[in-house]
Image (spheres, coloured by chain):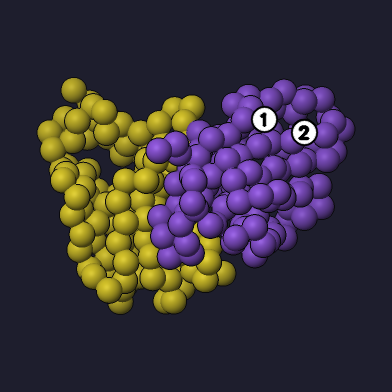
Chain colours: A purple, B yellow
Amino acid sequence: DAGVTQTPRHEVAEKGQTIILKCEPVSGHNDLFWYRQTKIQGLELLSYFRSKSLMEDGGAFKDRFKAEMLNSSFSTLKIQPTEPKDSAVYLCASSLGSQDTQYFGPGTRLLVL
Amino acid sequence: GEKVEQHESTLSVREGDSAVINCTYTDTASSYFPWYKQEAGKGLHFVIDIRSNVDRKQSQRLIVLLDKKAKRFSLHITATQPEDSAIYFCAAKGYNVLYFGSGTKLTVEP
């Protein structure tokens, strides 16, 4: 059974560009999460979907970050426009339900120049 | 909202010894406490969890303790091996969301 997959694994963008990160949750999972990981801030929640409905949208990230769940097996995170401070690892996770274990993908390492 | 503090930022032990990582949380409503392991360049790998209806859980060499009164939980890794070297994150679940500690870098020296 496949785990959470994320593409691309690495992304380099120029300041001001639009980038789209992709995530496929574990098959059958209803909850999907996007996190950002940096050494200074640690792990921060960006978005949380339950059965494709947006449940949480990290307040600090509403401005340039938009996550969508196009269907139950695919989600995207768009950053527009990118800024150097967006350089981080972006992690996607999924769980069967809100009370269940979250399983993480390998992450996308983003570098914004 | 919930705040999770992970007390050890680094921890070094000799192979075969035990390692203990401690976390505290602030929200008495939190009821689920998972632990994750992260190796270099990889995502978070779930290792063990505990729910608030128990105070101890063991899975092979991993033991999690939960003290709800003190709002404290800990991960004990017994008989450590070099492959246990990684960053370990504790987390507490509030309403719907996991709040993570800042991570403990565990080094197991041969």
Q: Residue at x 74, y 36 (%)?
A: A20
Percent of width and height locating residue B32: 38, 65
Q: Residue at x 23, y 70 (%)?
A: B54
Would residue A49 be found to the left or right of residue A64 on screen?
Answer: left
Q: What subunit carries mark 1?
A: A
The residue to which callout 1 is attached is A110
Whether residue A92 is visible: no
Residue B75 location (% of width, % of height): 27, 52
Q: Amino acid at mark 1?
A: Leu
Q: Which mark is residue A57?
A: none
The front one of A100 and A51 is A51
Q: Label 2, label 1: how many angstroms apart (C-alpha)?
A: 9 Å
Viewer-nearest of discs 2 and 1: 2
Front-most of residues B41 and A9: A9
Q: Please identify the quarter of the rendering in which residue A92 is found.
A: top right
Using the image, tell me which numbered label, if any, was put on residue A19.
Answer: 2
